[in-house]
Image (cartoon, grey):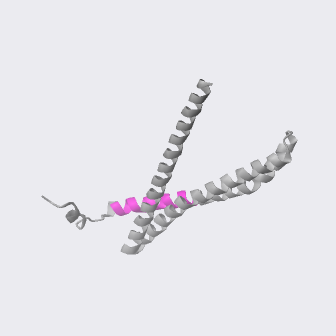
Amino acid sequence: MDQPNQNMFDLQIDQQTFRYFSESAKWAKFLSIVGFIYCGFMVLVALFAGAFLATVFPMMGASGKGASIGGGIITFIYLVLAIVYFFPCLFLYRYASNMQLAIAHNEQGKMQSSIRNLKSLFKFFGIVTIIMLAVMALAMLGIMISGHVSLAS
């Protein structure tokens, strides 16, 4: 019976696998750069949303104080989203760049760094997924409790 780790050292990366890595690195670099641009747009929206809401709300009859608080909340939310979205883009960019260098120069260290960044990307998405599932579960619990309370009234 073979041990699972014994075969791992016999693993070979052939030309077809190199082509797959090369193509995935190109797409990853493209997606990461688009992601960085998107982060920049989110920061711009965050900076201008407050001023826009402060201008629009008084025209609609809302008080200036409410508009500035609403604009501040929108600004905060967009800045937080931009920061959170920046990290997966960074991990993806590092994966792509290191993979392209590893393939071009046949460097084992760059290959390891590339795969480490890919692992970090998946770990990041896993943690965010767990957080989102917990928030959704709490929201559903809150809805059920508030529905039960309103039915009892």
- In the rendered view, does 26 fall on the left or right side of 5? right
Q: Position of residue 4 (x, y in %)?
A: 21, 60
Q: Residue at image x 52%, y 59%?
A: 88
Q: Is residue 104 above or below residue 120?
A: below
Locate residue 35: give its quadrant.
bottom right
Q: Residue at x 80, y 46 (%)?
A: 66
Task: Say left or right for 123 vs 70.
Answer: left
- Residue 8 horizontal/vertical position (percent): 25, 64
Left or right: 3 in relation to 106: left
The relative height of residue 56 versus residue 41 in the rendered view (above or below) is: above
| Magenta-colored stretch includes residue 24 | yes
Question: Is 144 within the magenta?
Answer: no
The mark total stands at: 0
Q: Residue furthest front?
A: 153
Magenta extent: 17-33
Residue sitting at x 47%, y 54%: 127
Location of the C terminus by quadrant is top right
Residue 124: x %, y % from top left: 48, 57
Q: Would residue 106 be visible to someone looking at this image?
A: no
User: Looking at the rendering, in which quadrant would you find the N terminus?
Assistant: bottom left
Residue shown at the point (40%, 65%) measured from the top left = 115
* Image-quadrant location for residue 100: bottom left
User: Which one is in front, 22 or 68?
Assistant: 68
Main SS of the magenta part reads helix
**Residue 39 visible in the shown view:** yes
